Amino acid sequence: MSGVRKGTGGGPTVVIAAHMDTVFPDGTDLKVKREGDILRAPGVGDDTSNLMAVLEMFRALNRGGVKTRGDLIFLASVQEEVGLLGARHWLENSGYKPDMFVATDISATEVWYGALRIDQFKFLYTSPGAHTMESRGGPSPAKAVAKAINALYEIPLPPIAEGLDTFKLPVLNVGMLGGGTVVNAVPREAWFTVDLRSLDSATQDSLESAVVSTARRIAEQEGVGFRMEKKMGIDYSKALPQKERLNHQLVQTALATSNYFRKPGTPEIVARDVGSTDANIAVSMGIPAVAVGATIERMPHRLEENADAGSIVPGIKSLISLAVALTSH
Ligand SMILES: [Zn+2]
């Protein structure tokens, strides 16, 4: 869902985005519970309170009759959590070529100007199958999966990137595995997934080729069939260089507004070269992009997720300042 707030003309076009989807299954109790200043509900931080803040920002600009030179585009995206699909669809098909892109999708304590490299794969091993009684010494997709997972975790990873708080990158994770249909037979198919993440394309590309060649080598060693499916991957070959992204007025202005309105007593916000938000798609297209937050939030993607009610008003003010600054010169 998107809308345009027209400017008077001659200024840059800026997208202010937030996403509508969450990671929680149908039937999850989403009713917000308030304990003092803390608002508790799955999804309350990622991304409900940010989406609400963006809407309030537009309402405030309208109530105040604020005029900007550039157009401000409101974008409420979908399927952010399953691969940034809504933002990608909009950027590729809306007909708009924004000059800057703001994803309102993190805690107000952070400013991200990068784009995490994320590649996700499913590796499948196959065999004709056999009854357990006839299987001794024969090929086994289950055994191949076990060996492959073990081998992938033996791939040496570069040292953990510094300054990232709780993120330990680069990293690979086997998140799902399965196969077979009965206890007493060799599975005709067994599979697992890999989620591979790092900060730059060079690291990601070399890890990706190590992962794929390892998975394939195990299939050959074990005498089983092999195929892979790429579940997700973004081409970052058009992304601007790191210094250019950091020094862009978009990121520097976001840093200034976020720090000006940050909660008194909290640490100064520094811009981090990371990101796994809708801004990634803009970064990959060479569009200056940043991720910011309007509210202080904790534990996204968990049932314990919560946000500070008191952070909402300064967060909206921060967004207003950012949007007006970016579109007014
Ligand atoms: Zn999010």
Image: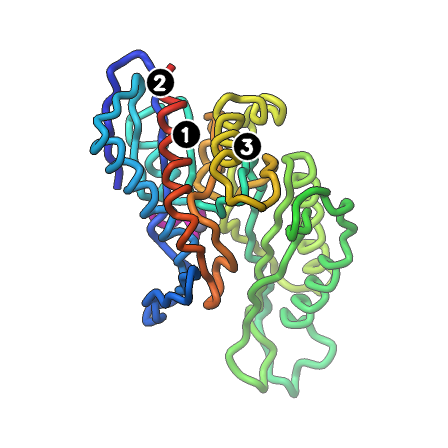
Q: Would you name the residue on which mark 2 appears?
A: 328
Q: Would you name the residue on which mark 3 appears?
A: 236
* Side of 95 relative to 296 (left or right): left
Which residue corresponds to the image point at 51% horizontal and 57% vertical from the top-left? 298
User: At label 3, which amino acid type do we have?
Assistant: Tyr
**Mark in the foreground, 2 or 3:** 2
**Mark in the foreground, 1 or 3:** 1
Structural crowding at the residue carrying mark 1, measured as other residues with C-alpha within 10 Å and reported as few (<14), some (14–19) or many (≥20)? many
- Residue 174: image quadrant is bottom right
Say if mark 2 contacts mark 1, CB within 8 Å.
no
Residue 149 x/y as whole percent: 68, 63
First in residue order: circle 1 vs circle 3:
3
Which residue corresponds to the image point at 56% horizontal and 35% vertical from the top-left? 114
Name the magenta segment's main secondary structure: loop
The residue segment tinted magenta is 78-83
Structural crowding at the residue carrying mark 3, measured as other residues with C-alpha within 10 Å and reported as few (<14), some (14–19) or many (≥20)? some
User: At label 2, which amino acid type do we have?
Assistant: Ser
Q: Is residue 73 magenta?
A: no
* Secondary structure beneath label 1: helix
- Between the C-alphas of marks 2 and 3, the distance is 30 Å
Q: Is residue 42 visible?
A: no
Q: Is residue 80 magenta?
A: yes
- Between the C-alphas of marks 1 and 3, the distance is 26 Å
- Which of these two is toward me, 78 or 40? 40
- Which of these two is toward me, 217 or 238? 238
User: At label 1, which amino acid type do we have?
Assistant: Leu
Q: Would you name the residue on which mark 1 appears?
A: 322
First in residue order: circle 2 vs circle 1:
1
